[in-house]
Every structure is written in C-alpha cells, then in structure tokens.
Image (spheres, rainbow, N blue to C red):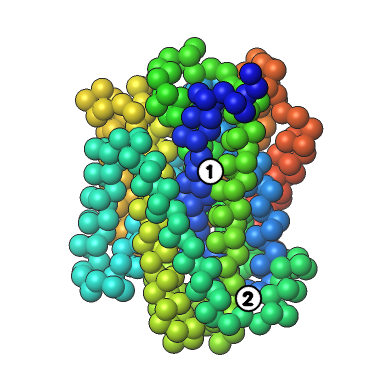
Amino acid sequence: MSESHNPSQQHTVLRSLGLGLITGAADDDCSAIGTYAQAGAQLGYKVLWTAPVTFPMMVAVVYLSGKLGQVTGEGLFSVLRSHYPRWFFYLVLAGVVTGNTIEAGADIGGMSAAIGILLHWPQWVLVLSVTAVSLVLQIWGSYKLIRNIFRVIALSLAAYIFSAFLAHPDLGGVLKGTLIPSIGFNKESLSILVAIVGTSLSAYLYTWQSNEEVEEKEAAGKHTVRERRGTTDGELRSSLWDVIFGMLFSNVVMYFIILATAATLFSVGKHDINTAAEAAQSLTPLAGRAAGLLFTLGIIGVGFLAIPVMTTGAAYDLSQSLGWKNGLYQKPSEAKKFYAAITFFTLVAMGLNFFGINPMRALVIAGIVQGFSTPPLMALIMAMTNNRRIMKDRVNGRLANILGWVTTIAIFSASLGLVISLFL
C-alpha cells in the first residue's frame, strides 16, 4: 500500500496541517508589524522588493528547522547541546533568549498600545492584562488547545491585506518597488534592511518549528526520543508544503503592511512613527476608519499568538540546554522548571515596558537584535542538517543547501553592512 493511502499517515498529515501557518503568523508579530510599518513610512514603495526576496529564505530556514525536529525527535537546542562545545552553545543560547525576551516585551507594549485605541484604559493596566492572559494560555492550556487557537488567530493577519487596498496605492510605484531592488548605503536604510531581515528570519522561528514537530509526535503518543526519531518522505513533503503555505501567508502580510504605510504615511511625508498603534491611527484619516481599525485588530490578534511563541520558545531553549523536562504536553506539576521559565521570561518581557522605552524604537531594535543573532544560528542549522551523525540518510539535498547557504550569506551580509555603515 502506498503512503498516500495509509490512514495513519493521512491522520498525521491532517493533524500537522497548519503548523507552518502558526509559525508564519508568529513571524508577523507586533515587532514585525512595527518594523514593516516603519519601513513603509520611512522608505516608501522602494522596499517592497524585500518581501519576494525573503520568501524563499523564510521557507528554507523554517523547513530545515522542522526537518531537524522530525528526524532527530528533539528540539533544536537539545540537538545543539549534544554536538557542540558548551561555551559556544551557551553563547548562542544567550543571544537567542535575549532576542526572544526583548521582542516579546516589545510585542506586549505594541499590543497594549493597539488595545488602548479601542479601550481607553491606563497603559499599565493593559500591559498587565495582556501578560496575564498570555500566561494563563501557556500554563493552563493544553498543546492541542493552544495549537487550534493559534490557527484561528493567524487568520486575523488577513486584515492587513484589506487595509492596504483601502489605502489606494500608486500602481506604478508599487510595481517599480516590487520588481527593482533598491538599497541606500546609509545607517537609516541599512538599519531598516537589517531589521526586516532580522524580523522575517527571526531566531525564534527556528526553535519554535523544531519544537512543534516534537510536540506533534508527543501528541501522537511517541514519548521517548527513540520513538520520535525518524520520519518518512511523505511526512517531509507534507511538512515542506505546509511551510511553503505558512511562509507565503506571512510574506504576503509583510508586503501589504509595507504597501499600506507607504501609500499613506510616506506619501504625506510622515516618515517617523512612535508606536505600531500610531501607525494604525495614522491610517484612519488617510485611508479611512476601516483601514485603521483593520490594522489595529491585526496587531491585537497576532500579539496573542506571538508572545507565547517567543516566551515558550525561550523556555524550550533554556530547558533543553539544562536537561530539564519540557513541553506543552507536560502538566505544570510534571515540568515545574519549564513552566517557571515561561513565567520568568514573560514577566521580564512585561517589565521592559515600565522603563519608558519608546515602543516603536523597541520594536525596531528587537528586529536588529534578531538580525545579529540569526546568522550564527542559521549557520549551525546548515551544519547540523548536513551532518550524517545527526541526520543519517536525511541530510540536505542540493536545492536545500543552495537556498540555506544563500540565506545564511544574505543574513551575514545585511548585518555586516549595518556595522560598516556605523563607521562611515
């Protein structure tokens, strides 16, 4: 009997469908929304080309991360811990956890500001409320519940597509900006470029996707590494198409956020915005109340998805690094240290909002931090997925290697370009 007619295989594929959508939607978190909005407001249509260019890169990094989890039956940092020197391993861990926490804090602030447009409550009340809801979902919600809620929330990002059309963009400028790459070699342009690359290829995507694959195997009753280890050609193909769909969704949303703010804010000379919520408010008089409302709802919806992805992702990384029992399939009483780590990272992220940091600056800085932490991690993923000791006969093929190394070089180049621009 062929794989396509195997009922259990079909059940696995159907259960897994949408994991890429969750990861793609989490990629368009409040930090990403703020970065893309700032890019459109500051540089206009001429940065639209970054969306189609980053799409194959996003597919490559997320697919390879998921493949690592499928083949090894372990999360990314669990594999790293087993195969690399501890000093190097902990250096990577520090960078990734720091980036996750800063970005989660920026997301809590951005989301609270967006809710403040609809509910005129004190900002501190909104920050505490968002944090509390996020913690309740992560600690007392089962993996299946969280996965299904995330799938629904992900669809809220479609709001940005509609808001862009309501902004009445200039078709000529859109086509030129999409098809003709343009890079300004100055600190402002390169900072935005690195932030776009960093936030669209954020390190938390790698760990989340690999851990989701492990969680799916746990949900199927495979509770030991030995049981989880290994995958089939059919499962890898299913994963690839799921990732392609999820990253395409994420990339289209990215494109239309830039388009909406370029057509409105950049066109009227408003090149600096202080918060993601301000971007939403600014769209209202220029593109209509519906566009501004849709932009706001998109920030709120994806925030409830992205914050747990980042703080739980940081807890996964720390727990796997220290050998703690971890996983959302575990009850809090069974994995106390894992859930304590989730709580700790969420509270630290919340605390960042009480230091008077400009929310939009924090969003862009978070993207830049991810931009610098991503290159070494991507290089490690390429090394691991080409290592036969780790992957056995599932090492990368030629196309995966080409896309993976081009992506790695592009991320390194963008970061290096920013560093050089700072000294010129």
**Residue 132 in view:** yes
Q: What is the spatial separation of the Cα atoms under label 2 and label 1, in whole angstroms?
A: 29 Å
The crowd level at tag 1 (other Cα within 10 Å; few <14, some 14-19, many 20+) is many
SS category of the residue bearing label 2:
helix
Name the side, left or right, on which 65 lies relative to 56: left
In terms of depth relative to the viewer, which is nearer, 239 or 203?
A: 239
The crowd level at tag 2 (other Cα within 10 Å; few <14, some 14-19, many 20+) is many
Percent x, y of residue 266? 58, 80
- Per the rendering, the mark at residue 20 is 1
Percent x, y of residue 247? 59, 49
Name the side, left or right, on which 117 lies relative to 287: left
In the rendered image, the quadrant that contains the N terminus is top right
Percent x, y of residue 293? 39, 74
Q: Give the labeled residue for mark 2.
A: 44
**Residue 51 position by quadrant:** bottom right
Do the residues under discs 2 and 1 have CB atoms within 8 angstroms? Answer: no
Give the foreground label among 2 and 1. 1
Name the side, left or right, on which 337 lies relative to 215: left
**Residue at 69 percent of width and 75 percent of height:** 174
**Residue at 23 percent of width and 50 percent of height:** 132
**Residue 266 in view:** no
In terms of depth relative to the viewer, which is nearer, 417 or 386?
A: 386
In the rendered image, the quadrant that contains the C terminus is bottom right
**Residue at 39 percent of width and 26 percent of height:** 219
Task: Identify residue type, mark 2.
Answer: Gly
Image vertical order of residue 202 relative to residue 88, above or below? below
Task: Identify residue type, mark 1.
Answer: Gly
Percent x, y of residue 299? 41, 63
Q: Earlier in the sequence, mark 2 or mark 1?
A: 1
Image vertical order of residue 1 relative to residue 254, above or below? above
SS category of the residue bearing label 1:
helix
Name the side, left or right, on which 144 lies relative to 214: left
